[in-house]
Amino acid sequence: IPAGANKTVFILAPLLTFVLAFIGWAVVPWGPDVVIADLNVGVLYLLGIASIGVYGIVLGGWSSGNKYSLLGALRGAAQLISYEIVLGMSLVGVVMITGEMSLRGIVQWQAEHQIPLVLLQPVGFALFVVGMFAETNRAPFDLVEADTELVAGFHTEYSGFRFGMYMMSEYMAMITVSAVATSLFLGGWGGPFGFLPGPW
């Protein structure tokens, strides 16, 4: 822990990011009856979790007492705000077509009609994929960790297990948005055309 760091926040910031990366899985359906929480507002829940996720980055960058970490954290907050709108708007068409905000209901609609929503909403899917890259800080949206300018971004002062928690959170977020994209646009557990027996 750096000498100028706010120790409590420095320790809790990676934990916050780690927890938020995992609780998005609560509404992702794995099968017809395999879901942790079938919320009626599952889409809003996911958007809310995604927007809260930046707090761990901002708190980690600020608490370390390093100006480069703070710059990386502020870039992360600005990027999240700008692409959160794209993610939200790309889901409006899905919600309007299906009449559902539950991910399980959206997957069941695709299975009943035997058509994946990627065919009905190709622009929405493309925008969602772009938003996915921006939300998970993948290239070309990796300004948060601009190695040539900011050393390593918001986690410059982190090492060991806390750094590992940030990395696990980042990769778990990539898996989560991929599972959400599959559920919303590619038919979820039933496959793209809903004719496969049982869950994939």
Image: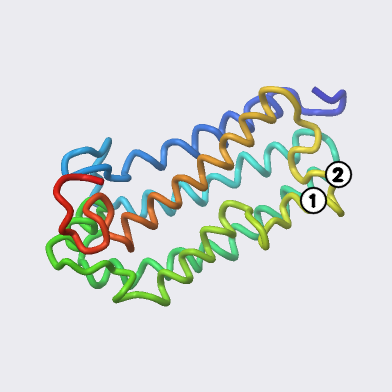
The location of residue 90, given as percent across then percent down, is: 42, 69
Q: Residue at x 41, y 42 (%)?
A: 24
Picture layout, residue 109 above or below residue 32: below
Picture layout, residue 73 above or below residue 2: below
In the picture, residue 191 is in which quadrant?
Answer: bottom left
Q: Residue at x 59, y 57 (%)?
A: 80
Q: Tell me the residue that label 2 is attached to.
A: 67
> Around disc 2, counting alpha carbons within 10 Å, would you say few (fewer than 14), some (14 to 19), or many (20 or more)?
some
Q: Residue at x 67, y 62 (%)?
A: 140
| Scheme of image coloration | rainbow
Q: Tell me the residue that label 1 is attached to.
A: 71
Closer-to-camera residue (113/158): 113
The location of residue 47, given as percent across then percent down, is: 43, 54
In the picture, residue 89 is in which quadrant?
Answer: bottom left
Asked if disc 1 and disc 2 are in contact, CB closer than 8 Å, the reply is yes
Q: Amino acid at mark 2?
A: Lys
Q: Secondary structure at mark 1?
A: helix
Picture layout, residue 132 above or below residue 7: below
Q: Residue at x 84, y 49 (%)?
A: 150
Q: Amino acid at mark 1?
A: Leu
The location of residue 49, given as percent across then percent down, is: 46, 46
The location of residue 94, given as percent across then percent down, is: 30, 68
**As drawn, which residue projects farthest toward the front?**
196
Closer-to-camera residue (100/120): 120
Which disc is residue 53 wearing? none
Closer-to-camera residue (10/189): 189
Q: Is residue 71 left or right of residue 180?
A: right
